[in-house]
Amino acid sequence: MQAIDDYPSLQRYLRGADLERHFLEFARTQENLTPDAHWPREKAYMLTQVRALVSRYTKLGDNAYFHVYLDIDECFKHALTAR
């Protein structure tokens, strides 16, 4: 992960990392949590946060975190569409 130092490499890593499976396995083994009926609705939000946190630990640091997190930031989306 520390070797990732550009956004295309980060995107390739995130696409291939199978983060949903890893996240759900962690939740099950560490907290005895399993997805329920809400998971399909919340999945995109939760996995974006996971991707953002994983991104933070690359050489891109906080810039990568916010670059990924902005996908779910409603204030940011609103600012882009406001005229």
Image: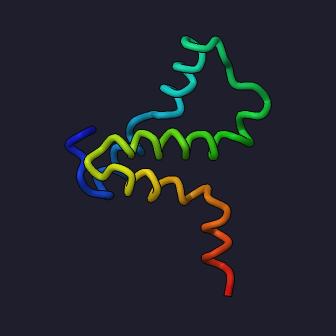
Which residue sits at x=61%, y=14%?
31
Image quadrant occupied by the N terminus: top left
Q: Position of residue 7 (x, y in %)?
A: 32, 58
Q: In this view, does 64 lie to the left or right of 59?
A: right
Which x, y percent locates residue 30? 55, 13
Residue at the limit of the structure toward the right, as seen here:
37
How many tags in the picture?
0
The chosen color scheme is rainbow
- In the displayed structure, would residue 40 be above or below residue 75? above
Camera-side residue of 17 and 7: 7
Q: Which residue is drawn at 51% across and 39% down?
A: 50
- Find the residue positioned furthest to the front: 62
Quadrant showing the C terminus = bottom right
Image point (39%, 52%), residue name: 62
Q: Which x, y percent locates residue 63?
A: 38, 57
Which of the 4 quarters of the picture holds residue 44?
A: top right
Q: From this view, report whether residue 83 is shown above or below residue 20.
A: below
Asked whether, in this view, residue 27 is left or right of residue 12, the answer is: right
Vertical side of 64 occupied by 22: above or below? above
Residue 63 lies left or right of residue 9; in this view the side is right
Residue shown at the point (67%, 62%) measured from the top left: 74
Most extreme residue toward the bottom is: 83
User: Residue 9: image x %, image y %?
Assistant: 28, 52
Query: Which of the pair 31/9 is nearer the observer?
Result: 31
